[in-house]
Amino acid sequence: MSASDPPPGFEPIFRTSPFLDHLGPFFMRKEPDGTFVVGLRVRPCHANGRGNAHGGLLMTLCDIALGYRTSSSVEPRPFLTTANVTTDFVGSATVGDWIEAHVDVQKVGRSLAFANCYVVCDGRRIVRASGIFSVKSPPSPTS
């Protein structure tokens, strides 16, 4: 078992990028209600000088979980651009911990979308975040 292995039920996240590949690996677990949770195992390269998960890692986890979940909550799926993410750190995670981002989508409107996120470690909330996204329509398919 590798240090980045997820718990049972998690699979590699459905969308990634060069930055996320560098920072991850990120995983997701589908929930019975059709939503999903995004998770990550804290590795040594994710740690700050005190051995805790770096705040930038936690903020990135919130940003991708908020954006991916909000975009997937409506059809057709809009393209979202982060306008604002506010994070409050209320706890910490250390190397080896599994952390999960749970998102509650508040509203997807014509121009803005709103969602909240909690990052959980061992049943404890360690980050509270809220996101606002600019909504763009997907391009029309060409004939």
Image (spheres, rainbow, N blue to C red):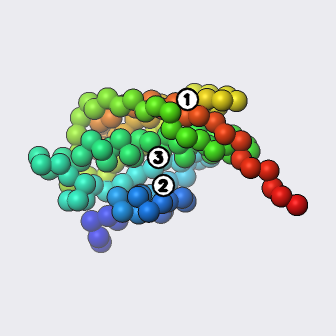
Q: Tell me which label, 1 or 3, sits earlier in the chain.
A: 3
Q: Amino acid at mark 1?
A: Phe
- Residue carrying label 3: 64
Q: Is residue 128 left or right of residue 141?
A: left
Q: Assess whether mark 2 and mark 1 are in contact (beta carbons under 8 angstroms).
A: no
Q: Is residue 48 left or right of residue 41?
A: left
Which residue shows up at 30% across the image and 72% down it?
1
Pick the front one: 56 or 98: 56
- Residue carrying label 2: 28
Asked whether residue 125 appears in the rendered view, the answer is no
Q: Amino acid at mark 2?
A: Met
Measure the C-alpha gap from mark 1 to mark 3: 14 Å
Crowd tier of the residue under label 1, counting other residues whose Cα lies within 10 Å: few below 14, some 14–19, many 20 or above? many
Label 3: which secondary element: helix
Pick the front one: 92 or 131: 131
* Quadrant in the rendering for residue 101: top left
- Residue carrying label 1: 114
Q: Quadrant of the C terminus?
A: bottom right
Label 2: which secondary element: strand
Where residue 39 appears, as percent x and y from the top left, is 40, 52
